[in-house]
Image (spheres, grey):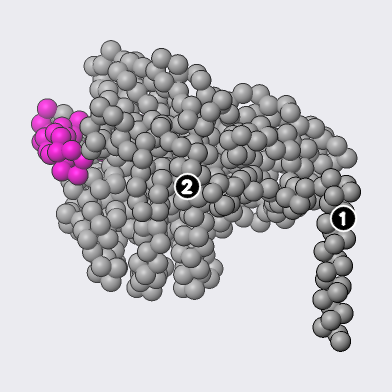
Amino acid sequence: MKNSFNCISKFTGAILLLITFVLFNISPITAQQPNNNIIIYADSGKSTISRHIYGQFSEHLGHCIYGGLWVGENSTIPNTNGVRNDIIDALKRIKIPNLRWPGGCFADEYHWMDGIGPKDKRPKIVNTNWGGVTEDNSFGTNEFLNMCEVLGTEPYISANAGSGTVEEMAKWVEYMNADGESPMANMRRQNGREKPWNVKFLGIGNESWGCGGNMRPEFYSDVFRKYSTYCKDYGNSRLFKIASGAPDFYYDWTETLMKNIGNRMNGISLHYYTVKGWDGSKGSATDFTGDEYFETLKKCEAIETALKNHIAIMDKYDPEKKISLMVDEWGTWFDTEPGTNPAFLFQQNTMRDAFVAALTLNIFHKYCDRVKMANIAQLVNVLQALILTNNEKMILTPTYFVFDLYKVHHDAAYLPLSINSEKYIVNNDTLDAVSATASRDSMGTIHISLVNINPDKDISITCSLEGFSPDKASGSIITSGNIKDYNTFEEPNKIGIKEFNNFKIDSGKLIINMPAKSIIGIGLK
């Protein structure tokens, strides 16, 4: 009898619901859509978003160094000691906090003494990883570290643990950091540099599971312990030693290093590239479908799964979070542009790349209690580059403008938030249409960065701030007419940062009308 009553009740309820939809003309699909809202806990920030999350990566690959950063002192292109002035100005504008060099895979075949002393006496070598081209070593240790000083950025040296020796790495540290009398310090002085550079960040090898030696994690653990032992601190400089970590979802590598190296390392790296497909396929950087756009963003957001699982392993061995996670290679990787050397990894940079950058940085912020550095690959002319050059011409990419828009988060207090977003649906698969992050800077200003990935739909979202009542607000936006848009040497200013004011403060809440395919920054005081 009870079951019969329940059946009648369910049937009656269904009829009443149907009548309601008919009478009030409410669409069931619309009714299921959530309200778009964000709650920012403005009085709860405990972790700091390290500025080093906004680090860069420069490898001897294609035209990143030669024809990119470096044109030489005798070039007709305006330069400072051989480094392009337009690039120096662009990098100063976004306040890059660190720059990783010389690789990448190139690092474990690089012997630093080839790149010091008189340029006409430096040996020419073959770059076996990237196209078999001749490397003349005109850009070496002094040139790189002097450039970092001009930029006001911290150098991150990726040292050779693959084909190099312990003695070679130890002497490189001595050359860069030793003061007083020592063989390598005296060699540095002979090469025109009196004072040490006091390099802090030192990577012991790169991708040691692959191009850096095809090592097993147990073997690499011993390599790290051995090499790092002989890399000494000099004077007041203190090395921050970074182990060559895992790619993507290779959790056993992290587990083994945490167990066998432990607190002998200050950081462990992670590499994660966003390609078009889960099967590793890449596709065109500029000619892609809506389905491919969605699939790329799906792969991009899966970095959060990788971070969660690697961090869980680190937490097991290091609950006090003394060891930092360094995502020192990340970004998009598509097919090279037609007509270019396939080994040079040159790709254009569209609004799709900008969305990958913004979504990824939002995720890094979320885990900033463990993620203390990240380096997008790569700075100039390679993969998801911020800058592209063509002889005397230079353009800034949509990705560059994301880093410009987001620089307000450098060393700011991360503010936790909860977000309720409608879905962006393609082929019955879903992503949240809106992503957001927030921080409070040293002056008390709250900065909110929001992303609307839906290429076709404007979204209105309401933002509440617990513990903060804003009086003033200002906004900026990155958007374009099509997700496939990009800047060219003929049209260099198609995409950039513009003023945004389509928002209001109402009863202490911020209401933002986000255009389709947009990245927005709001500052609140």
Considering depth in this image, is 384 or 161 the residue closer to the camera? 384
Q: Looking at the image, which residue is at 38% across and 74% down?
A: 259
Asked if the residues shown at circle 1 and circle 2 are in contact, with their CB atoms under 8 angstroms apart, the answer is no
Circle 2 Cα neighbour tier, 10 Å, few/some/many (<14 / 14–19 / ≥20): some
Q: Is residue 130 magenta?
A: yes
Q: Is residue 67 magenta?
A: no
> Which residue in the structure is indicated by mark 1?
19
Residue type, numbered disc 1: Ile
The percent coordinates of residue 96 (x first, y second) are 47, 36
The numbered mark at residue 204 is none
Vertical relation: 349 (above or below) 174: above
Query: Which quadrant is the N terminus positioned in?
Result: bottom right
The numbered mark at residue 295 is 2
Circle 1 Cα neighbour tier, 10 Å, few/some/many (<14 / 14–19 / ≥20): few
Tell us which disc is closer to us: 1 or 2.
Answer: 1
On the image, which quarter does residue 340 sit in? Answer: top left
Vertical relation: 210 (above or below) 105: below
Q: Secondary structure at mark 2?
A: helix
Residue type, numbered disc 2: Glu
Considering depth in this image, is 4 or 193 the residue closer to the camera? 4
Q: Looking at the image, which residue is at 46% across and 70% down?
A: 313
Q: Secondary structure at mark 1?
A: helix
Q: Which residues are magenta?
A: 120-148
Q: Is residue 190 visible?
A: no
Q: N-terminal of the two: label 1 or label 2?
A: 1
The percent coordinates of residue 385 (x first, y second) are 39, 34
